[in-house]
């Protein structure tokens, strides 16, 4: 059974890997009533939506190669839930392609799982990154070369300006637990993308 949705704001980051469209989303707590909006940190201070979006993308980049040819540089969207519809409020152009060498692999799905302060699970899903082989890790780190480092990117282990560990929330609008909140990261094949790409 999924958690009831309490959060009413999210950052969506559409990106393209070799012509395939993907989107990553995280929930946040929005501040302000007009552009430019802010995002509330766990200590109740605020940063701009643009800075928060770049922080999320900086963490996501640990999933992708830095060859600059496979992954598009996205534009993030701050969205607000009104009734049953997510409406766009503000846009932010992001910078950066990836964090490490190599290539990004088709039809791979990387799922990151964390705990929030109410100990409920928070899931972040990234598609077609640089991790090829099926893998599961549970120990976050500050590495830039492996899956443990990606897991650490949303758990306070990496040095990231506007660290998303400080402002990403779960469906219940509770903040991430921090360095003790990482549950695990898993790489597996995504069958839908595999079919769309015509892979055997």
Image: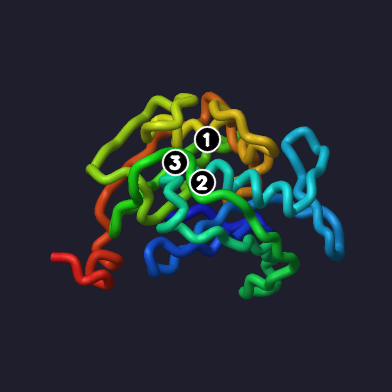
What is the quadrant of residue 167 in the picture?
A: top right
User: Label 1, on which residue?
Assistant: 153
Q: Gap between marks 3 and 2, in whole Å?
A: 14 Å
Query: Is 191 or 71 nearer to us in this picture?
Result: 71
- Please give the residue where the numbered disc 2 appears in the rendered image: 60
Check if mark 3's residue and mark 1's residue have beta carbons within 8 Å.
no
Colouring style? rainbow
Alpha-carbon span between mark 3 and mark 1: 12 Å
Q: Which mark is residue 174?
A: none
First-in-chain label (1 vs 2): 2
Instruction: Report whether 27 appears left or right of 153.
Output: right
Q: Nearer the viewer, mark 3 or mark 2?
A: 2
Contact (Cβ within 8 Å) of mark 1 with mark 2: yes
Residue 114 spot, x, y in % from top left: 49, 38
Q: Which residue is mark 3?
A: 113
The residue depicted at 69 percent of the width and 62 percent of the height is 78
Residue 9 figure quarter = bottom right
Where residue 183 appears, as percent x and y from the top left, is 42, 33
**Callout 1 secondary element:** helix
Residue 4 in the image: x percent, y percent?
A: 55, 56
Mark 3 packing: few (<14 Cα in 10 Å), some, or many (20+)? some
Mark sitting earlier along the chain (3/2): 2
């Amino acid at each position: 059974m999924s958690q009831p949705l309490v959060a009413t704001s999210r950052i969506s980051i559409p990106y393209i890997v070799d012509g395939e469209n993907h989107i990553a989303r995280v929930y946040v707590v929005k501040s302000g009533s007009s552009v430019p909006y802010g995002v509330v940190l766990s200590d109740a201070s605020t940063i701009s939506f643009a800075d928060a979006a770049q922080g999320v993308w900086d963490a996501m980049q640990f999933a992708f190669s830095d060859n600059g040819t496979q992954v598009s540089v996205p534009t993030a969207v701050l969205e607000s839930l009104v009734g049953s519809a997510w409406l766009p409020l503000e846009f932010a152009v992001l910078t950066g392609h990836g964090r490490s060498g190599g290539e990004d692999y088709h039809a791979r799905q990387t799922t990151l799982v964390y705990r929030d302060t109410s100990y409920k699970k928070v899931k972040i899903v990234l598609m077609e990154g640089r991790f090829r082989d099926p893998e599961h890790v549970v120990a976050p780190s500050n590495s830039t070369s492996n899956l443990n480092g990606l897991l650490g990117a949303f758990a306070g282990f990496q040095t990231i300006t506007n660290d998303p560990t400080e402002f990403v929330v779960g469906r219940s609008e509770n903040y991430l637990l921090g360095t003790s909140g990482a549950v695990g990261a898993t790489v597996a094949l995504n069958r839908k993308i595999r079919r769309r790409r015509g892979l055997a």
